[in-house]
Image (tube, coloured by chain):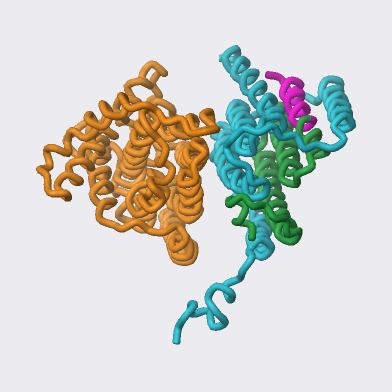
Chain colours: A cyan, B orange, C green
Amino acid sequence: MSVVSGIVFWVLAVVAIAAGVAVFRVDSMARATYALAASFVAVGLTLLLLDLQFLGVVTVLMMVMEMAVMAIYMIMFMGMNPALMPMSMVHGKRAALAVSIGTFGVLAAGALLVPWPTRRGAPAADLVESLGEAVMHSKMLVMMTVSPVLFATIVAALVLALPRSRYDRLGDDLRGPDRR
Amino acid sequence: MTVVQVSAAWVPVAAALLLAAATAAASLDGALAARASGRPAAQGLALPAAETARLFRQRRRAPVAADTLLGGVGVAGLLVAALLMVAVVPFGRWTVADLSVGVAWFNAMDVLVWAAVWLTGWGPNSVHALVGGYRFLATALSYELPLMFALTAPAVAAGSLRLGDVVAAQQDLWFVVWMPVAFVVFCAAVVAFSVAGPFSAAVGSVTAGGVLAEAAGVDRWLAATGRYALLSAGSAFGATAFLGGGHGPLLPAWLWLLVKTGALLTGLVVLRRRLPVLRPERLAAPAWLVVLPLVLLQLLAVSIVVVVRG
Amino acid sequence: MTLQTVLLVAAALISVGLYGAISQQVVVMVMMGLELMLNGVVLAAAAFWWFLSPAPDGQVLLLVVLTAMTVEMAMGFAVATLLHRARQTDMTDMATDLSR
């Protein structure tokens, strides 16, 4: 099965990188958003190949949801219709290309030349159960710290983004527009 | 009972079963619609065949500057999401894909519906379709979190995300008996992600058909089939996770699953005709302020029972 | 599918994302570039986990990285909405009225 998984990995890798490049080259905002979604789904499926089943499925879930909502923001800010119009709003394109190619060179050299250590330990028999144990048992404090961070994010994002608060919608006593 | 994963050659059989269930749901819907408008019910039973014949002959609409790639992905995505959803449901002793994260996979596939419906609305370059797509996302933001927590309840009770284990844990008592809130929320969410019934603002007549305003021909057939297939796949999953799956006295396990899926599907089709369409903005406050805490309390109750049981 | 090949793919994703983050003029496109970079980081972290030390604790780190990505996107879009509203650009297209 290793040959099949190798081929699947290369297909997913090509899809992920091609979709990533397509984000900045397609002609419509919705296509850019969903190209990014395709790239994320390819990475999520690669995580499935690496035996990170729960994380792979959760990545696909979160990223598709996020891209669906991001598409609304794209259209809200840029106001484009589904017609395909050439859009390339860049500054300093050649410098950015040079920096990104240079970064790829450095990272690839690092990936290929660093003498990585050998594998320590073997994956648990039931990876999902061992992840559940880790999250709920030894790493529970980490999860409990993450939770108020997420709640603060929700509150802060809503406060920043809402144009009108509850008091504007419902009046000062929060009982609705016209109550006598 | 342990679940055995069958080879990929059985995938067309699973797809055919799903389409048969979707056709049955559409027939029942047609019969109910016929009776509601005064005609005999038998006339409505032939609705799937009649609509298929009509739509396959109809010409597809090509609005000006439509994004046909994304629109095509959208309409096909509904049916694909339903097929992927039902791939993890254990059909008696067999399943197409015995994923160790089956419950999370179902959740991920119902999020694909978000993208599919919005793309269906975006593709035709039409205002009404786009408004329908936005309305669907507004509805989805309300039902998704309660659905996620309602899906967690059977997983906690079974101690595993694998659907075979969820079925096996219902050997003595179906989950619907001691987690009714989760079951009700799950059923509501199934109706919602099939863009049906009280949550069908996205395809409502207020917006001239919503996301289906410009869909014609094969596109419309794919979208309609996809919606009924999503309802069927959700019912199959509900029968597995809440109604005990294949457990039952006389009949073989796969037949029990079909019976339970059929019962749940019938209930959902009948119920969705009886409830009025809810506006998405009126759904948000009750969903986040009432339903979500209720589901969390249900999850707490389930967790306490699991811990006490040992 | 060795550690080096997966890291190469992750490096490519990070570089493409970096190009987007540096060169794009629109705020949301910059954020898409950042998302691509985090995509590459998640893939690289998963590769390190699988090939070097597949203990459950590593998966918890990946969960935290995913959470950080979500927090970044949520705050980024909230700030972008606020900036867009404050600048009072007059886009006459109907869909942009959402931001008023």
- Location of residue B176 with respect to B106 vertically, above or below: below
- Location of residue B136 with respect to C38 vertically, above or below: below
| Place of residue B53 in the rendered image (x, y in percent of width and height, measured from the top left) | 26, 26
Picture quadrant of residue A96:
top right
Q: Is residue C79 left or right of residue A33?
A: right
Q: Does the magenta stretch include residue B17?
A: no
| Place of residue B57 in the rendered image (x, y in percent of width and height, measured from the top left) | 30, 24
| Place of residue B109 in the rendered image (x, y in percent of width and height, measured from the top left) | 47, 37
Q: Which of B100 and B294 is in front in this view?
A: B294
Q: Is residue C12 magenta?
A: yes
The residue that appears at 38% across and 25% down in the rendered structure is B4
Picture quadrant of residue C17:
top right
Q: Give the range drawn in magenta.
A: C1-15
Residue A110 visible to an observer of this rendering = no
Picture quadrant of residue B6:
top left
| Place of residue B172 in the rendered image (x, y in percent of width and height, measured from the top left) | 29, 47
- Location of residue C27 with respect to A100 vertically, above or below: below
Q: Which of B110 and B10 is in front in this view?
A: B110
Q: Is residue A102 left or right of residue A66?
A: right
Q: Which of A147 and A59 is in front in this view?
A: A59
